[in-house]
Image (tube, rainbow, N blue to C red):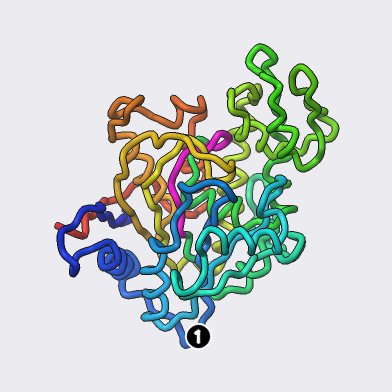
Amino acid sequence: MSKVYFTDLTSDSKDDNFYSRLKKLYRKAGNDLKFEDNELVALKLHFGEKGIDTFLRPIRVAPIVDSVKDSGGKPFLSDSNTLYKGSRSNAVDHHMTTQENGWVRPVIDAPVVIADGLHGNEFYSVEINGIHFDEVKIGAAFYQADHILAVSHFKGHGMTGFGGALKNLGMGCASRAGKLMQHYDVKPEVNIEECIGCGECEIWCPQDAIEVEQYAEIDHEKCIGCGECRIVCPEGAIEVEDSSSEKELQEKTAEYAYGALNGKQDKAVHFNYVMDVTPECDCPPWRKEPMVPDIGVVASNDPVALDQASFDLVKEAKGKDYKADEDKFMAAHDVDATHQLCHGEKVGLGERDYELIDINK
């Protein structure tokens, strides 16, 4: 049974604040993790799309950066370019967005490296012999790093139900070509009774596969299934009719996570910040109301157990529009988000059974 370590967010002393608790969490979950001198340690992050403010803030990641340095590693902050149009689809815009969102010194003492290069085509193929993929395309910086630590904002997602460590590693470490491999079978449809013709989906489509007159129309010959139209639609008018494609997307994401951690699983610790648990991810340039109050931060060297524990904490919590012991991601998106956990366990990423340990008790 994997161990998952937890801390809540309340304290009443300068010696027991968020910074000190995160460093303690790192020590407990990492079992006093040490690196060889100057080993390169990638902190896999989502820097936040321009215009959103619920992404994981740099000041909250700083204790992990300092802990890696204390352990002998050389940390850098990294993500790969997005498949959709936005403020992070090439390395130049991506860097500009990281700076505008505060990922700079002295707020956080580590450089930003865009993992898959200027246009998202710098990657290595990693053999995994999975169910869907024989090999996966991982951003060059993640492949070349000695270690990867997934530092994730745990929240909802319109296509996978929720996004945690597995999605952060699987979708986030993939090059643009790798993202396409994962999304290819997803084909969204427009509910014309709900569509208001606002044009947001047309703006965000990376393939110009959508035209809006009275309502949106999707050209499935051009569509690559990235699903961003569904995420950015303010009315929820874009749906995925074939639920099997959503399950396959979760499976493919888990296999990519396995590929991203290939050879690096034994010397890593991952973190999920169960805070600002919004229904959608950090890609749309706006925010929705969190589903539950802030809960805390969990950490483990097992990303499957980590996501399972995070899911359970959110499920147990009571929100403004959600009941305690309710699968809030199913309620929000009609997606069984636990399928990714099942597949992650199946491919050998970790186990769903865990022991939750409160480091403050």
Q: Residue at 28%, 57% (x, y): give it.
A: 5
| Residue 202 sits in quarter | top right
Residue 170 x %, y %: 58, 52
The residue identified by callout 1 is 38
Q: Residue at 73%, 37% (x, y): give it.
A: 203
- Determine whether, in the image, residue 314 is placed left or right of residue 184: left
Query: Mainly helix, strand or loop, the magenta region?
Result: strand
- Determine whether, in the image, residue 13 is placed left or right of residue 347: left
Q: Sort mark 1 into few (<14), some (14-19) or many (20+) by Cα contacts within 10 Å.
A: few
Q: Residue at 28%, 34% (x, y): give it.
A: 316
- Determine whether, in the image, residue 130 is placed left or right of residue 167: right
Q: Is residue 226 visible?
A: yes
User: Which residues fall within the magenta stretch?
Assistant: 151-160
Residue 132 x %, y %: 67, 45
| Residue 260 sits in quarter | bottom right
Compared with residue 67, is residue 225 higher up or lower down, i.e. above or below? above
Quadrant where the C terminus is found in the figure: bottom left
Residue 98 x %, y %: 57, 61
Magenta stretch containing residue 197, yes or no? Answer: no
